């Protein structure tokens, strides 16, 4: 709730724009150029490429990097945001609480995956209002010549699930959701999950 509705830049800067909301893209004028995120990312890519020789693995790694950029805004897919401030009081009490938990309960608390969103959304609804090729004589009264297709997505983490779905396969004929072509409003980039799509652009539907 703090990330989506709080007084910060993350509400409308999720997905590929997350680093801008976190302030990790820009650097100080006198900062060391080698410390810039871009150069660090390139170093990580070179290191992983040298360690991986299998062609299929290379394809999968490339696909994952693209998906991570589209859904998380980073090559690694790290979901931690600088706007998530840790609760120090909870951290101090955590050891005492952990001592009272059995092993199964501890494992249940640490089952996060690389696809989990910073702010999981359980419901998304989009209405496609795109122009059609219908002629004037084919349109009915009051018809603006646009589609009215509504689809809903539900789950524990809607955009996290779409992220995982986008890297299920590297084979073109088996890809369900291509991370290179998926529209920005399906990556959680808009920070909102209910709206209309007109001419490929997302318009927030405030009143639901």
Image: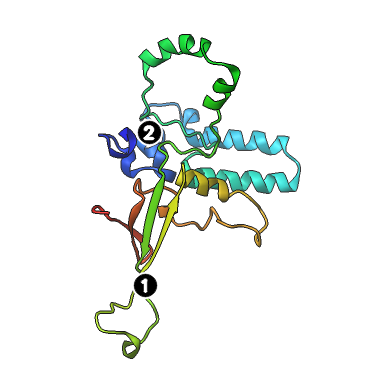
Q: According to the image, label 2 marks what residue? A: 22
- Residue furthest to the bottom in view is 137
Q: How many labels sit on residues?
A: 2
Q: According to the image, label 1 marks what residue? A: 147
Do labels 2 and 1 touch, CB within 8 Å? no
* Left or right of residue 161, residue 204 in this image: left
Residue at 42% in and 39% down: 120
Q: Residue 66 placed where, x, y %?
A: 55, 47
Q: Residue 146 placed where, x, y %?
A: 34, 74
Q: What element carries label 1?
A: loop
Q: What element carries label 2?
A: helix
Residue at 67% in and 49% down: 59
- Residue furthest to the right in view is 54
Task: Work out whether mark 2 precedes mark 1 in sequence or the reverse, and give the earlier one.
Answer: 2
Q: Is residue 40 above or below residue 142?
A: above
**Residue 208: mark:** none
Picture quarter with the C terminus: bottom left
Q: Is residue 171 above or below residue 70?
A: below
Q: Residue 141 placed where, x, y %?
A: 25, 84
**How would you rate the neighbour count of disc 2 (Cα within 10 Å): few for under 14, some for 14-19, many for 20 or more?**
some
Q: How far apart are labels 2 and 1 at the CA level?
A: 37 Å
């Amino acid at each position: 709730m703090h990330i989506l509705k709080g007084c910060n830049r993350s509400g409308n800067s999720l997905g590929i724009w997350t680093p801008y909301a976190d302030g990790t893209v820009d650097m100080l004028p006198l900062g060391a150029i080698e410390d810039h995120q871009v150069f660090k990312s390139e170093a990580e890519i070179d290191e992983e490429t040298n360690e991986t020789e299998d062609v299929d693995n290379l394809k999968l790694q490339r696909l994952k990097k693209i998906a991570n950029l589209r859904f998380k805004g980073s090559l690694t897919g790290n979901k931690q945001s600088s706007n998530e401030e840790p609760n120090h009081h909870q951290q101090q009490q955590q050891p005492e609480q952990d001592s009272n938990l059995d092993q199964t309960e501890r494992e249940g608390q640490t089952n996060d995956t690389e696809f989990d969103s910073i702010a999981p959304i359980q419901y998304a609804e989009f209405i496609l209002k795109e122009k059609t090729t219908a002629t004037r004589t084919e349109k009915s009264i009051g018809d603006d010549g646009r589609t009215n297709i509504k689809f809903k997505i539900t789950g524990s983490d809607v955009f996290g699930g779409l992220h995982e779905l986008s890297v299920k396969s590297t084979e073109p004929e088996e890809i369900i959701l291509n991370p290179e072509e998926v529209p920005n409003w399906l990556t959680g980039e808009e920070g909102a999950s209910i709206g209309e799509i007109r001419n490929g652009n997302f318009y927030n539907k405030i009143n639901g």
